[in-house]
Image (cartoon, rainbow, N blue to C red):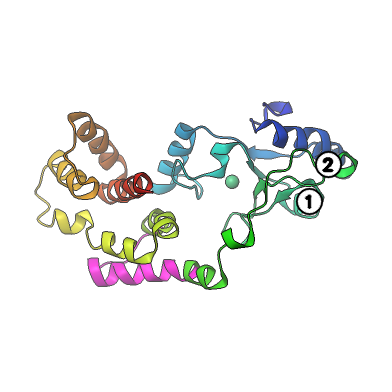
Amino acid sequence: MDLSGGRGWLQDDAAKNIMNYVDPVAVRELGRVLQITSAGRTYAEQAALYAAYLNGSGNLAAPPGTSVHESGLAIDTNDATWLRSHPEFGWVNTGLGFSEPWHFEYQGGAALAGGPINPIPVPKEDDMPSLKELAELAATPFKIRAAYRTLLNRDATDADIAGWLPVAVDQGWDFVEQWIGKSPEALTADGTEDLAAAVGRLFQQDMGRAASPQDVVYYTDMAEKQGLDAVHRFLVWARAQGAK
Ligand SMILES: [Zn+2]
C-alpha cells in the first residue's frame, strides 16, 4: 500500500500504522507527518542501492534479497529520535548500533487506543543472536582486515569490508576467510588476462559451474564498473544464498 505524500510503499498493516497512528501524533508533536527517506524496495531497487554502496557512491545497503526493505516492513526516517521515543507504535530501531540509526522495522504491537493491529510475531529469544554471536559480529571487520593483510598482502577497503560482512553474518567467519583467500587478485596475478576470461574463470571457481555467455556479458560489465573483487563477493554471496 502506498503511503500518503509519495513516501513509498509498505505492507498494508505497516502503512496503516504509519498513516493512522504515527502521522497524527507526529503532526501534533512535530507539526508534520513522519519524514520517510526510504520505505519498501523491489529486488532491483535494492540491487541498485547495493551496487552504489559497493562502488562508493551510496549509503550502506544490504545485498539484494537480504533487506527487510524488500518485505515492505522497514523504513528509513529523518525523525529517528522522535520515533524512538514512541515505542508504542511498534517500530523497532533495529539499525541502531549497526551504523543505520535511521532504520526502523515494523514488529506490530499496540498502536495507541486501536490496540494491536494484526501484529507480526516478534522473534523468539532463541532466534536472536547471543551475546557471543554479537561480539563475533562486532569483531568481523577486524578479522576481514587481518585476513586481507595476511592472504592478499594489502589493506581491505571499506567496500571490501561491507561486501563480506553480510556473507559473514549468513555463513560464518570460516566461510568468508576461505573465500577471501580465493580473491581474483590471486586468480589473475599476472594482470595480463582479458577481463572476460578472468570473469569466466572466477565464475567457475565461485559458482562451481561454467558461466553461460550471458553470465560472462553480465559479470564482465559488473567487473568493469565495480571491479573483479566486487563480482567475486557477489558470486560467493549468491551461491551461499542458494545453498541455504
Ligand atoms: Zn533502512
Give 38 or 20, whichever is nearer the viewer: 20
In x, y percent, where is residue 218? 26, 33
The residue drawn where x is 26% and y is 38% is 219
- Which secondary structure lies at badge 2? helix
Give the quadrant of the N terminus: top right
Q: Is mark 2 within 8 Å of ligand 1?
A: no
Q: Is residue 97 above or below residue 52?
A: below
Q: Is residue 96 above or below residue 16?
A: below
Q: Residues within 10 Å of mark 1 (few under 14, many from 20)?
A: some
Name the magenta segment's main secondary structure.
Answer: helix
Residue indicated by mark 2: 26
Tags 2 and 1 touching, CB below 8 Å = yes
Give 138 or 242, whichever is nearer the viewer: 242
Q: Is residue 149 magenta?
A: yes
Residue indicated by mark 1: 82
The residue drawn where x is 67% and y is 26% is 2
Q: In the rendered view, does 14 fall on the left or right side of 239? A: right
Magenta highlight range: 138-158
Question: Where, by quadrant of the figure, is residue 9 drawn?
Answer: top right
Query: What distance separates the C-alpha of mark 2 from that of mark 1?
Result: 8 Å
Q: Is residue 10 above or below residue 68?
A: above
